[in-house]
Amino acid sequence: MGSLLKSKKSTNFNFTGAIKLALKVTIFTDGTFRIAVFMAKGGYKNVFYLNVSKNKFSSIEDLTPVYIKPFNAYWHQNVGEYIYELSDKIFT
């Protein structure tokens, strides 16, 4: 079974409406990583990079993103008040 997040129960707070990006980054002792996207939404492009050194930040075009969420895409899976990681949006 994958990971999950539980939304806060409140009449004044809508977890899925307030949060635009929810992901879990796990870094293993061997230096590898796992990114699991729980939610990515909104009318914007979402690009996620890892291992970006300070001197390379100025030339981001040369970097390879871990994942890209296209404009207006809506990645989200929930059951009741739980948000589950998206099995097709896990990057290693």
Image (spheres, rainbow, N blue to C red):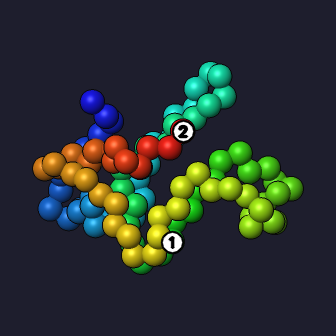
2 and 1 marks in contact (CB < 8 Å): no
Quarter holding the N terminus is top left
**Quadrant location of residue 59?**
bottom right
Choose between 54 and 10: the one closer to the eye.
54
- Asked if residue 79 lies left or right of residue 73, the reply is left
- Asked if residue 48 lies left or right of residue 71, the reply is right
Mark 2, secondary structure of its residue: loop
Quick check: 46 above or below 52? below
Residue 49 rendering spot, x and y as whole percentages? 63, 53
Amino acid type for the residue under numbered disc 2? Thr
Residue 35 rendering spot, x and y as whole percentages? 49, 43
Quick check: 9 above or below 68? above
**Quadrant location of residue 71?**
bottom left
Mark 1, secondary structure of its residue: loop
Name the residue tied to disc 1.
45
Residue located 16% across and 48% down the image: 79
Residue located 79% across and 50% down the image: 53
Name the residue tied to disc 2.
92
Residue 5 seen in the current view: no
| Cα–Cα span, label 2 and label 1 | 20 Å
Residue located 27% across and 61% down the image: 16
Residue located 18% across and 56% down the image: 10
**Quadrant location of residue 84?**
top left
What label sits on residue 69 in the rendered view?
Answer: none
- Asked if residue 80 lies left or right of residue 89, the reply is left
